[in-house]
Image: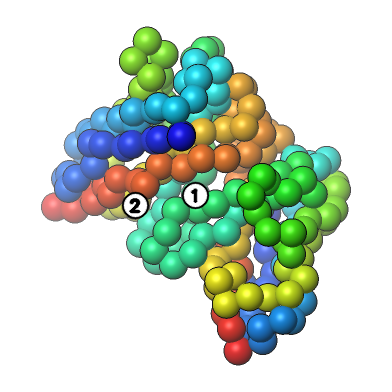
Amino acid sequence: DIQMTQSPSSLSASVGDRVTITCRASQGISNNLAWYQQKPGKVPNLLIYAASTLQSGVPSRFSGSGSGTDFTLTITSLQPEDVATYYCQKYNSAPQTFGQGTKVEIK
Amino acid sequence: QVQLVESGGGVVQPGRSLRLSCAASGFTFSNSGMHWVRQAPGKGLEWVAVISYDGSNKYYADSVKGRFTISRDNSKNTLYLQMNSLRAEDTAVYYCAKDRDSGGWGGVNYWGQGTLVTVSS
């Protein structure tokens, strides 16, 4: 099975900072990758699909890039409401594995 | 608006069975791939199973294969998860989720609120 590894596991940044989260697949998955945001006590929310396509209604400060095995989620200007855990997920084949998550906090 | 409402969770003893249901509304259920995803207390998301729009294709995580069965009734707009031989490690909130793709290969764009399953003696 293909493993999905996110880094870092957690980060602390200041409001307005640029934040980058990485997701690496153990084998190539083309662009079959999604990113989700889960705020504390809430249900996950789709941010990005097809590695770089912004889901409708998601703020433009979120962006995704990558293909094959290496992917990145970027928040260009971190806001207080972005405090959450972020997950990547591969969906090209079963199992549709999630990464272990990256917890983002405000410094 | 899309609504996914799970039911059937609760406390169950190890080795017993439980069936979860998910009532869907606000979209054409019979055109959508559907998933079950779970989250153990304080842990990350774990994908459990996917079913295609017509029920013809089903796939499972290794951790539940042979014990859990995903199914759907398009006439009732309802998704199911039959869970047998439950273990303590199956304790989690179980989310019903709608895929962007009819086959279930597009990422999840809607989630239910989840139902808690606790496996304990």
Secondary structure under tag 2 reads strand
User: What residue is disc 1 on?
Assistant: B46
Point out residue B34 in the picture as x, y percentages from the top left corner: 50, 29
Crowdedness near tag 1: few (<14), some (14–19) or many (≥20) residues, C-alpha within 10 Å: many
In the rendered image, the quadrant that contains the N terminus of chain A is top right
The answer for which chain carries disc 2 is B
- Circles 1 and 2 on the same subunit: yes
- Residue B74 position by quadrant: top left
As helix, strand or loop, the secondary structure at mark 1 comes to: strand
Q: Residue at x 49, y 64 (%)?
A: A39
Q: Is residue A27 left or right of residue B120?
A: right
- The kind of residue on which mark 2 rests is Ala
Residue B14 disc label? none
- At 17% across and 48% down in the image, what residue appears? B11
Gap between marks 1 and 2 measured at Cα: 10 Å
Q: Is residue B16 left or right of residue B90?
A: left
Q: Chain of mark 1?
A: B
Screen quadrant of the C terminus of chain A:
bottom right
Q: Are marks 1 and 2 in contact (CB under 8 Å)?
A: yes
Q: Of the residues shown, which amino acid type is indicated by label 1?
A: Glu
